[in-house]
Image: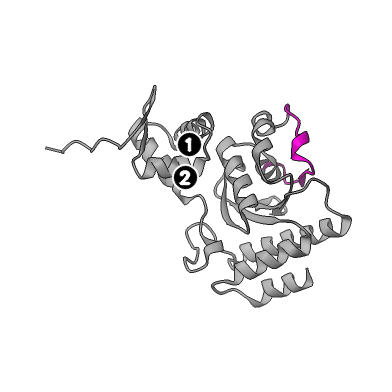
Amino acid sequence: MVVVLGLLQARAGPGATRDIAVVAAEALGVDGLALSLSTGTALTVTELVWCTDDSAREFEDLQLTLGEGPGPEAVRTGAMVWVPDLSRISAERWPVLAVEAVGLSARAVFCFPMAIGAIRVGVLSAVRCTPGPLTPDQTDDALVLASALTARCLNQDEPTPGTTDPTDPLCELQHAVVHQATGMLSVQLSLPLADALLRLRAHAWSSGRSIVATAKDVVERRLRLDRHLNREGPTPPLPDKD
């Protein structure tokens, strides 16, 4: 973790996040790390900025699809949320996640809120492909890392939504296509953005696909959601203004 903190202080250019994220995951003894930043006044809405591997990305996609999970709860409450065994999730706490988590490669998730006082910046999520808790030393290191990333974000050294470096694959906004699809649905269905996102989530979950894959179909006009039914296929062209 000393090496990770040194990287955070010394590197701020393209590619820096990749080095930091990979070394940090190794230092914590986890398979994947994900950093999500709050995007507005709704404390459950975050934007995935980077993740280190498929297990972390898969879990973050599922949380976004369902709108529930340890990540949103950590941001909302400002407290650590641990799930050392995803197969033992309480159905009362996260009813849909308890069912859907069975098919994930991630078997344990640990979410650390990124905050200074009442300022909620985001959440650092650590994913493991085997069940079991973090050790006390790993927990201390994760808290230090979350604090350092919080300071980096507030100092604007960490990419924020809309300011990422396209040359760094770990700095891309991972869910940008979801926002695009939400905007399109808002116009097509004459719905507020929040309701359009709920429709997108509902279709993704009911069809057994991730919200990212569903959003891509909407944006690329392979899927159109009507008010009362869903239709596969290309979106009809807009009528001429004449």
Quarter of the image with the N terminus is bottom right
Disc 2 packing (10 Å; few <14; some 14–19; many ≥20): many
The label on residue 197 is 1
Where is mark 2, residue-wise?
Answer: 178
**Residue type, mark 2 in image:** Val
**Residue type, mark 1 in image:** Leu
Q: Secondary structure at mark 2?
A: helix
Tell how many labels. 2
Q: Pick whichever of labels 1 and 2 is earlier in the sequence.
A: 2
Q: Secondary structure at mark 1?
A: helix
Disc 1 packing (10 Å; few <14; some 14–19; many ≥20): many
Quarter of the image with the C terminus is top left
Residue appearing at x 74%, y 64% in the figure: 26
Q: Give percent across and percent down for residue 224.
A: 36, 34
Q: CA distance from mark 1 to mark 2?
A: 8 Å
Whether tag 1 and tag 2 are in contact, CB under 8 A, the answer is: yes
Note whether residue 26 is visible: yes
Task: Say above or below: 26 vs 87.
Answer: below
Q: Is residue 200 magenta?
A: no
Residue range (magenta) = 76-92
Q: Nearer the viewer, residue 103 or 65?
A: 103
Q: Nearer the viewer, residue 172 or 25?
A: 25
